[in-house]
Image (cartoon, grey):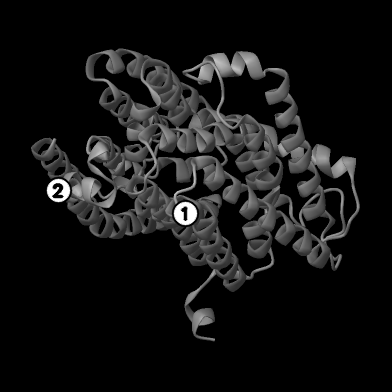
Amino acid sequence: MFLKKYINNISGLQVFQLIRFGTLLLISIVFAKSHLTTESIGNYEFFLFITALFCSFWINGLIQSFLPLYRKNKTFDSSATKSPEIFNAFILISFLSILTILILLIFKAPISGILGSSGSIPYFNLILVYIFFSSPSFLIEYIYLLKNRPGEILRYGIITFTAQFIFVSLPVFLEFDIKTALSGLIIISIIRYVWLIILLKKYTLFAISFNFIKEHIHFAWPLIISTLVGSSASYVDGFLVLNKFDEATFAIFRYGAKEFPLVLLMANALSTAMISEFSQKEKLTGVLVNLRKRSANLMHLLFPVTIFFLVFSHWLYPKIFNPDFAESAVIFNIYLLLIISRLVFPHTILIGMKKTNIIMHASFLELAVNVLLSIIFINLWGIKGVAFATVIAFAFQKIVWLTYNKKVLGISPKNYIPLKSLTIYSLITIVVFCLMY
C-alpha cells in the first residue's frame, strides 16, 4: 500500500533502469577488484558491446512502436480480455533474434575481421545463445507497463538484477575465469525468458496475425532507423577504439564512456511525459511555459550533482575500480558535459507536433559529425578525442532542432528553455571541467 501511493509507471520504469545500471556498475567494480586481467574484463565488455551493436536498435524500435499499437490497431478487437498484440510482438522480436543469429553465423569471418582486434570474436557461441534468450525478454517490463503494474516492474527488476549480480559476480569472486561469469549471464537470460513465457500465458492470446505484424513493422521501421542512427555514436566510438587500440584500452574507454544515468533517465522521463501535451495547439503557450519551468527544476537538481562528480571522479575511479582505470575518469568527465545538451528539449516539441522527419534527418547529421570528428580527434587526443566528438555531435543535433523550431515553427528557444539558468550552470560546469581536466 505504501509503494502504491508513490510509485507509478514512470517512476517504476525510472527505478527499474537505475537498478539495471546499478547492477552493471557493481559487476564492473567486482571485476576491477578481482583477479581478472584488464584484457579479460575487456572481453566481457566486448561481449556486451557486440550484442548491443546487433540487437538494441531494432529491439528499441519495435518496442517503442508497439506501445501505441497496444489496444489501438486495425487488426484486433480492443475489448478482448487477453492481448494477441503482445504475443505477436513476441513472435516478431523472436524472429528477428533468430535472423540476427543467422546473420552473425553467415558473416562471422568478415565481422570478426572488422570488430575483433585479434581477428576473432571471443565467446562467439555464448553471444548467439545470449541474443536468443535476452532479446525477447526486454518485453517484460513493458508488459507490466501496459497492464499498469508498476509494483511488478520493481519486483521483477529487484529479483532478476539481484540474481544477475550473483550469477555473474560470484564466479569471479570465487576466482573462476570470465567464461564462467558469462555463463552466469546466460543463465539469468534464460530465467528472464521463462518469466516472459509465464507472462505471455497469463496476459496474451496465442494467435498469430500477419496483418498485425505487417502493421507493427510499418510503424516500427522509421523508429528502428532513427534509433539505429541515434545510437550509432557509441558504436562508432567503440569501433574506432577497438581498431586503433587493444582490449585493455577498450576496457578503459568503456568504463568511462557512460552518460550519467540520473540525467539521462530524468530527462527522458520529462520529455516522454510532455510529448502528448504538444498535440493541442490551442494550449501551446502554456505547455511551453510548463516545459521551461520543469527544465529549470531539473537543472537545479542535476547540474550540482554533475559538478560534484566532475570534481571527485578522478579520486573515485581508482578507489571504486583500480588504478588501471584512472584514465576512465577523464572519459567519464567528458561525457558528463552531455548534460548541457541533454536538458534542452526541442525534440519534445517536434515529436509532440508530429514533425518526425527532422528528428531522423538531424540524427543522420549527428552521426556524420560524430564520425568525422572522431576520426580527426582520435589521432590528436586518443580515446579522449573520441569522447569529445560525441559531446560536440550531440550538441550539434540539438542545435539543428532548435533552429527548426525557431525558423519553421516560429517557437523561440526562450519560450521553452530557461536560458539564464542554462547559461550559468553551463559556464560553471565547463570551468570546473577545465580545472579538473
Viewer-proximal residue, 110 or 419?
A: 110
Q: Horizontally, is 1 left or right of 246 in the view?
A: right
Q: Quadrant of residue 220?
A: top right
Check residue 276 in the rendering and tell me which mark sits there, or answer none.
Answer: none
* Above or below: residue 221 compared with residue 295: above
Provide residue 167's location: percent of width, then percent of height. Answer: 55, 56
Query: At 69% from the left edge and 60% from the top edge, which residue is drawn?
Result: 143
Q: Tell me the CA gap for discs 2 and 1.
A: 30 Å
Provide the secondary structure element on which disc 1 rests. helix
The residue positioned 45% from the left and 50% from the top of the image is 172
Q: Which mark is residue 311?
A: 2
Residue 311's spot in the image, x, y percent?
A: 14, 48
Q: Residue, x 30% and y 13% (percent of image)?
A: 376
Q: Which quadrant does the C terminus fall into?
A: top left
Asked if disc 2 and disc 1 are in contact, CB closer than 8 Å, the reply is: no
Rate crowding at label 2 as few (under 14), some (14 to 19) or many (20 or more) other CA atoms within 10 Å: some
Residue 145 quadrant: bottom right
Residue under label 1: 169
Give the residue furthest to the front.
175
Q: Amino acid at mark 1?
A: Ser
Relative height, residue 262 to residue 210 (above, below): below
Which quadrant of the figure contains the N terminus?
bottom right
Instruction: Look at 12% across and 35% down and name the residue there.
Output: 434
- Compare marks 2 and 1 and give the one earlier in the sequence: 1
Q: Quadrant of residue 91?
A: top right
Q: Could you tell me residue 63's position as x and y percent?
A: 66, 46
Can I make out residue 22 in this image? yes
x and y percentages locating residue 123 in the rendered image: 59, 32
Q: Is residue 273 visible?
A: no
